[in-house]
């Protein structure tokens, strides 16, 4: 209209297929119950599983409960464990980003890197690329920062 494109960006999703690669169908009953998946793994695990998959680039994927379980265990459960440990040992002091501890400075730098990478990927509408650094950061936070800080 009037010499301009009617939109700036277009987002196209692929098709989520059954685990065997066939189209999901009520008739074939070849899909897991979405509410069972949400109750078992939580909505965040489902969101991350789908956001980090090629389906956000317009490609088809075969839904796999095993993949969802992996996302839950490696990302969601790990982050919940980090939070539980934080709640257990947090003191009354306010946090700041000016610590002299080398590990504190490293994890703060990693957090800033995470924000930069995810923001750049989100601005470019590359949702799958925006989700990968989140998993890497959670791994660094739990595997390196917490274990070395003890």
Image (tube, grey):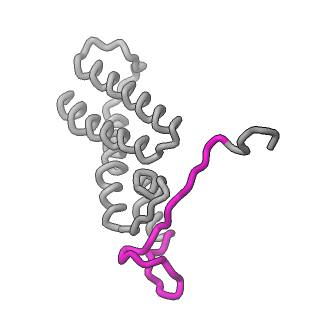
Residue at 32% x, 40% y: name it: 138
Q: Is residue 17 magenta?
A: yes
Q: Is residue 43 visible?
A: no
Image position, residue 135 (x, y; %): 33, 43
Residue drawn at (40%, 22%), measured in percent from left and top? 92
User: Can residue 42 be seen from the camera position used here?
Assistant: yes
* 120 shown above or below 5: above
Furthest residue to the right? 2
Q: Is residue 18 above or below residue 98?
A: below
Q: Nearer the viewer, residue 146 or 133?
A: 133
| The C terminus sits in image quarter | top left
Residue at 24% over, 31% down: 145
Q: Quadrant of residue 66?
A: bottom left
What span is in magenta?
A: 8-35
x and y, in percent, of residue 27 in the image: 52, 88
- All told, the count of numbered labels is 0
Q: Position of residue 16 (x, y in %)?
A: 47, 67
- 105 displayed left or right of 97: left
């Amino acid at each position: 209209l009037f010499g301009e494109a009617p939109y700036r960006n277009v987002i196209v999703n692929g098709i989520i297929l059954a685990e065997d690669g066939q189209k999901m169908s009520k008739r074939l009953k070849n899909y897991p119950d979405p509410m069972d998946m949400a109750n078992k793994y939580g909505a965040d695990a489902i969101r991350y599983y789908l956001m980090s998959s090629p389906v956000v680039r317009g490609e088809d994927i075969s839904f796999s409960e095993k993949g969802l379980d992996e996302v839950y265990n490696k990302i969601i459960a790990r982050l919940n464990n980090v939070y539980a440990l934080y709640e257990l040992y947090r003191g009354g002091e306010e946090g700041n980003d000016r610590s002299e501890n080398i590990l504190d400075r490293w994890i703060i730098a990693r957090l800033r890197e995470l924000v930069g990478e995810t923001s750049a990927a989100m601005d470019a509408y590359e949702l799958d690329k925006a989700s990968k650094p989140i998993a890497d950061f959670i791994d660094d936070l739990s595997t390196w920062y917490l274990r070395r800080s003890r």
